[in-house]
Image: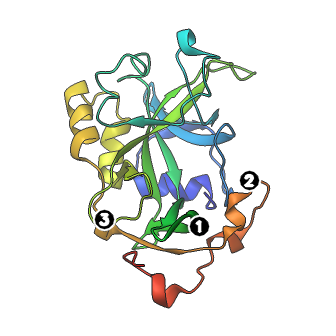
Amino acid sequence: MYESMDHYLRQLSLDLVVINGYDHASISRYNVAPSTRVEVIRQIEGALSVDRVKWGWSPFWAKGKRPDPINARAETVVTGKFFKGLWPGGRALAPANGWFEWVADPADPKRKQPYYITSADGGPLYFAALAEVHQGMEPNESDGFVIITAAADQGLIDIHDRKPLVLKPETAKEWLDPATSPARAAAIVTAGCRPAEDFRWYPVGKAVGNVRNEGESLIAAIDSENHQGQLEF
């Protein structure tokens, strides 16, 4: 997540006032880790709010029982008990430039190679998210967000056979709009993800495995001629 928030918002083409979190400065994060605070976009009372929220969330009755989940499965998020407090009113977007996946070598599962996945056209990505955010001077300990994940379709690299629910800008606008019905939002969860051909991926260095490492070098391709596109061993 390395562009400015202005860049992500402009691509959405939303004719709404941004009440907070708008900035022209580059965010410049190349190794965003779970449990850190990340910018999420929400639409509230006819305006946009950009809030830095902890990546991870649990309902009050599950706090402390296990680490807060960072993802919600598309197959169960609408009907399951765990995220009932976020659905459907907590719809939000987590903007990004790409994400990483670690792919195991079939010949030696202990050997894993990180891949960077980004848009084929160079545009920003919008991950469908659910967030709990309380407005106030200090962060609320119950605040957090999760990214919805879907089954990875053919050709898209994903070690867990999952991918973020990445929305096209026009679908992302629908997702944010409080006027979008729960039925339509559920349909977006089911079938709204961008297809594999909208992405490109390539191997990157293993330095991304250490959350203390940062910088543009983390998304630099290595041996790209042999690994660009579909994964083969």
Q: Which residue is mark 1?
A: 111
Query: Which quarter of the figure has residue 110?
Result: bottom right
Query: Quick one: label 1, few (<14), some, or many (20+) residues within 10 Å?
Result: few
Name the residue located 67 percent from the left edge and 61 percent from the top edge. Answer: 30
Specify whether 179 is left or right of 133: left
Sequence-wise, the earlier of marks 3 and 1 is: 1
In this rendering, which labeled residue sits more in front, label 3 or label 1?
1
Disc 1 is placed on an element classified as: strand
Q: Which residue is mark 3?
A: 196
Placement of the N terminus among the 4 image quadrants: bottom right
Most distant residue in the top direction: 61
Specify whether 211 is left or right of 185: right
Residue 47 visible, this angle: yes
Residue 25 visible, this angle: no
* Amino acid type, mark 1: Arg
Query: Which quarter of the figure has residue 68?
Result: top right
Q: Is residue 194 above or below residue 22?
A: below
Nearest the camera: 114 or 134? 114
Sequence-wise, the earlier of marks 2 and 3 is: 3
Disc 2 is placed on an element classified as: loop
Q: Which residue is mark 2?
A: 211
Residue 194 place in picture, x, y as percent: 30, 57
In this rendering, which labeled residue sits more in front, label 2 or label 1?
1
